[in-house]
Image: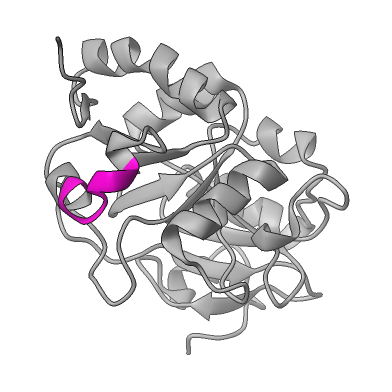
Amino acid sequence: MSIAPLTVPFWSTAEVEGALRGVIAHLAEKRVLAYPTETVYGFGTAVDHASVEALVRMKGRPATKPFLLLIGDPSQIARLALHLPSHAAHLAARFWPGPLTLVLPGGDHRVPARLRGPEGGVAVRWTPHPGLQRLLAAYGEPITSTSANRPGVPPAMTSAEIVQQWPDEIHRGLLHVLDGGRLSPSRPSTVVDCTGRRARVIRPGVLSANVLRECVPDLVGDT
């Protein structure tokens, strides 16, 4: 009897292409995916209530801490009825794809409440990770994203850490793990709230406020 591998290679172009069919089928079953990003390994699902709740239950995520969305191109924002205000559009044009997360208004009746933050918006990032870009292009929809770790444990930098922390979920088929190798340590993305009249930094990260102000001069926060 053959034993299913605990992880799926997701490093070379051929490995990424070979993984796509299984990933898309797994997401369609409303289960959780673990994948490498440009910063740390993440957990994600399809963007629907049942899928998001599966991730909430698996990770034990508090209701006050929403997930963000990863997109493969800006057209996926419009399909969820999210809006790009002018200041958000300027930031996206300059820094996407890249380490910038924008909290956007809209998405009424299209985005589950668990993805909406206290400011009322939905956090979105266009990932620069080439493997994820290919996955999102093939899938055709955004996926949710949160760090792949148990509470109180640092985010995973290798797939082996995920296997060690979540063996039961993997064996039960709830969690499908893509192995993109060991990731290099990096700062998190900068998060900018674009739901108000002025863009506001709500989490400092790779991109400093001074750099962001080169295209949005009235940005506030992270002084």
On screen, residue 40 versus residue 196, left or right, reads: left
Residue 37 seen in the current view: no
Q: Is residue 188 above or below residue 18?
A: below
- Residue 165 magenta-drawn? yes
Residue 9 x %, y % = 19, 24
Q: Quadrant of the N terminus?
A: top left
Work out which residue is located at the far front of the displayed protein and give it: 1
Q: Residue at x 74, y 53 (%)?
A: 112
- Which quadrant of the figure has residue 127? top left
Residue 203 seen in the current view: yes
Q: Is residue 4 above or below residue 57?
A: above
Residue 153 x %, y % = 24, 71
On screen, residue 112 versus residue 160, left or right, reads: right
223, 157: nearer the viewer? 157
Instruction: Tell me where the magenta segment starts and ends, as one range.
Output: 163-169
- Which quadrant of the figure has residue 68? bottom right
Give the mark count.
0
Residue 143 x %, y % = 55, 39
Q: Residue at x 34, y 30 (%)?
A: 130
Residue 154 x %, y % = 23, 69
Work out which residue is located at the far right of the displayed protein and give it: 109
129, 9: nearer the viewer? 9
Q: Residue at x 71, y 47 (%)?
A: 49
